[in-house]
């Protein structure tokens, strides 16, 4: 889906010259600040403009990352590197998406806002302790074998195979 959106927004005839909020053309970038001077590294990687939809997308990604990283617990050896990458990704996408169409940045921005909204609503209405308690109770219950598994075990017993777990 992401690759399709990446290809769709710049090529869509319907979006050409279609204004939305401050963007004058959704098939091109929405420059709120532009400059003509070539600034060595900035102009090469970022471009000669600042796109507001791209800035909003990056800020919403950082907020979403911060909101969701509070859920991750545990002292995993990979966590420090993963946490750094989770915050570097919005910065990298800021550089990548600044030159792309405003429609694509707007799509990612809305997607991030919807994800943040869903996360907040789920956290408000779901009791984590009750869910964890229910999971632990279900772990203690004996697991019922499916009919297929029972038939396979019966066929194995008929052929003389023994269960390796019971040895």
Image (cartoon, rainbow, N blue to C red):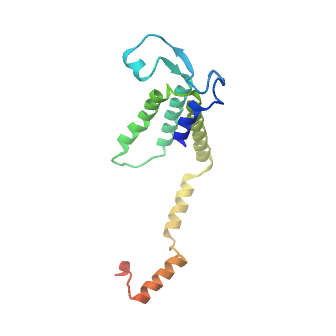
Check the picture and name the quadrant holding the N terminus.
Answer: top right
Q: Is residue 143 above or below residue 76?
A: below
Q: Is residue 144 above or below residue 68?
A: below
Question: Residue at coordinates 51% horizontally, 71% vertically from top-left?
Answer: 141
Q: Quadrant of residue 116?
A: top right
Q: Position of residue 136 (x, y in %)?
A: 50, 63
60 left or right of 161 in image:
right
**Residue nearer the viewer, 145 or 1:** 1
14 left or right of 35 in image:
right
**Residue nearer the viewer, 31 or 5:** 5
**Residue nearer the viewer, 5 or 88:** 5
**Residue nearer the viewer, 19 or 147:** 19
Residue furthest to the top in view is 37
Q: Quadrant of residue 4?
A: top right
Total marks in image: 0
Question: Residue at coordinates 50% horizontally, 30% vertically from top-left?
Answer: 58
Q: Is residue 159 above or below residue 27?
A: below
Q: Position of residue 120 (x, y in %)?
A: 59, 42
Question: Residue at coordinates 37% horizontally, 81% vertically from top-left?
Answer: 166
14 left or right of 77 in image:
right
Check the picture and name the quadrant holding the C terminus.
Answer: bottom left
Q: Position of residue 122 (x, y in %)?
A: 60, 47
Q: Position of residue 55 (x, y in %)?
A: 52, 26
Q: Is residue 115 above or below residue 154?
A: above
């Amino acid at each position: 889906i992401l690759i399709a959106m990446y290809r769709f927004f710049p090529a869509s005839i319907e979006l050409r010259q279609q204004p939305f909020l401050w963007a004058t053309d959704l098939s091109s970038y929405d420059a709120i600040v532009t400059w003509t001077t070539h600034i060595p590294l900035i102009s090469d990687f970022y471009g000669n403009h600042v796109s507001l939809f791209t800035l909003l997308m990056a800020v919403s990604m950082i907020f979403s990352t911060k909101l969701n990283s509070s859920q991750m617990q545990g002292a995993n050896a990979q966590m420090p590197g993963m946490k750094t990458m989770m915050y570097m990704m919005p910065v990298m996408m800021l550089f990548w998406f600044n030159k792309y169409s405003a429609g694509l940045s707007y799509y990612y921005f809305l997607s991030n806002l919807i994800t943040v909204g869903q996360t907040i609503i789920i956290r408000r209405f779901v009791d984590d302790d009750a869910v964890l308690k229910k999971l632990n109770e279900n772990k203690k219950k004996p697991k019922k074998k499916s009919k297929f598994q029972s038939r396979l075990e019966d066929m194995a017993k008929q052929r003389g195979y023994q269960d390796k777990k019971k040895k």
